[in-house]
Image (cartoon, rainbow, N blue to C red):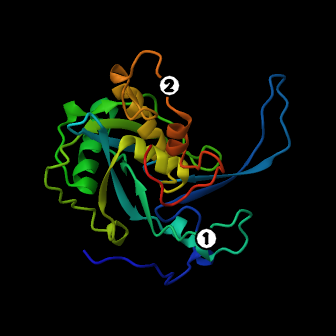
Amino acid sequence: MKKVVGIDVVEDRTAASRCDEGFLRLRRLRIANVYEDGTRSAPYACDVMTRRHADAVAVALYDEDAEGRVLVLLREGLRPPVTLRATRTDLVQSDARSWLLLPEVVAGVLEDEDVGHDGLLRRAQAEIAEEAGLAVPPDAIALLGAAFFPAPGAAEERVHVVAAPFDRNAPRAPTGDGSPMEEGGQVIVLPLDEAIRRCRRGDVPDAKTEIALLRLADHLGYSPHHGRRWADVEAGATPSPARLAWLLGRDEVSGTSPADRTAV
C-alpha cells in the first residue's frame, strides 16, 4: 500500500448538490416546541445530518502480555473532514496539527442485515476482519454498555460499543473496503493506559475511541491509573500524583504536555 502524504480537493460540489444526496445527507428543518398546555414556540431552524444507515459499531480489541498489561489495537485512517480543518482561517481556537491520519478503534456502519444483537456481533466481526485483518468469532465479542450519541446536536448517529480479544502475534492482513479513504493507514498496538493517555493528551482525539477504551477498562476490571487489573492492586492503594500526571499527559508541575515523556 502506498503511503498517503496529503489530500487535495479536486472539486467542491457544494453549490450544485442537493442536501438529500451523497453519503451524508442534511435535513434542513424548521421546528417548534410543543408545550403541555398545547401552545407552541416560534419556529426555529434545525439541521440534522444523517445517512441511509444511521448507526455504527465500535470495537475495542484487546490482548494481555506476560506481565499482565492489557494491550489494545487501534487503526490509523484518513479522515478528510478533520484534515481539511487546516484550510480554515476562522477557527476560534487555532489548531496547527494536520490530522492526516487519525488513530481510532475499529468501527463500521451497521448495514440492513445487521438486525438485533446477533446482527451487531456479525457486523463487529466483519469490521474486525476488514480493518484489522483478524478473525474473531462472534461469541467472543461482548457488549460494553448502552449505545451513545457522539454528536446529538447535529447528527442522529448512535454508536454501539463492543469488546473482543485478539492475538497480537497473529498475522494481520486488513482487506479494506476498496475505497481510497481506506488507504494509507496502519494498525498499531498500545498498552491500554498509554492509549487512554493519548486520548486525553489529544494525540487520539476521537470520542468513540476514548469511550470504548474506558468502558473496556471497566469491563476487564483494569485500572489505567495503576497499569494493572484491580485484583492485582493492593487494598487501599492509590496512584501517585506523578502517575496521574503521566496518564493525563501533562507535566506534574507546569501542566504542560511534553512530547517526550516516559512512564512513571
| Marker disc for residue 238 | 2
Q: Is residue 15 left or right of residue 23?
A: right
| Marker disc for residue 12 | none
Residue carrying label 1: 96
Residue 20, position as x, y percentages in the image: 55, 61
Q: Is residue 135 left or right of residue 123?
A: left
Classed neighbour count for the residue bearing mark 2: other residues with Cα under 10 Å, few (<14), some (14–19), many (≥20)? few
Chain-order first, disc 1 or disc 2: 1
Task: Give the residue displayed 43% in from the left and 35% down from the top.
Answer: 224
Instruction: State the SS at label 1.
Output: loop
Residue 136, position as x, y percentages in the image: 19, 41
Q: Residue furthest bottom?
A: 10
Q: Residue furthest top?
A: 235
Task: Give the residue displayed 38% in from the left and 44% down from the top.
Answer: 58
Q: Is residue 55 visible?
A: no
Look at discs 1 and 2 and give the one toward the viewer.
Answer: 2
Instruction: Return the residue nearer the eye: 40 or 250.
Output: 250
Q: CA distance from mark 1 to mark 2?
A: 36 Å
Q: Amino acid at mark 2?
A: Thr
Instruction: Return the residue nearer the eye: 95 or 111.
Output: 95
Q: Amino acid at mark 1?
A: Ala
Number of marks:
2
Instruction: Return the residue nearer the eye: 112 or 185.
Output: 185
Residue 124, position as x, y percentages in the image: 29, 43
Q: Is residue 60 visible?
A: yes
Measured along the vertical axis of the image, is residue 118 above or below residue 256?
above
Residues at badges 1 and 2 in contact (C-beta under 8 Å)?
Answer: no
Classed neighbour count for the residue bearing mark 1: other residues with Cα under 10 Å, few (<14), some (14–19), many (≥20)? few
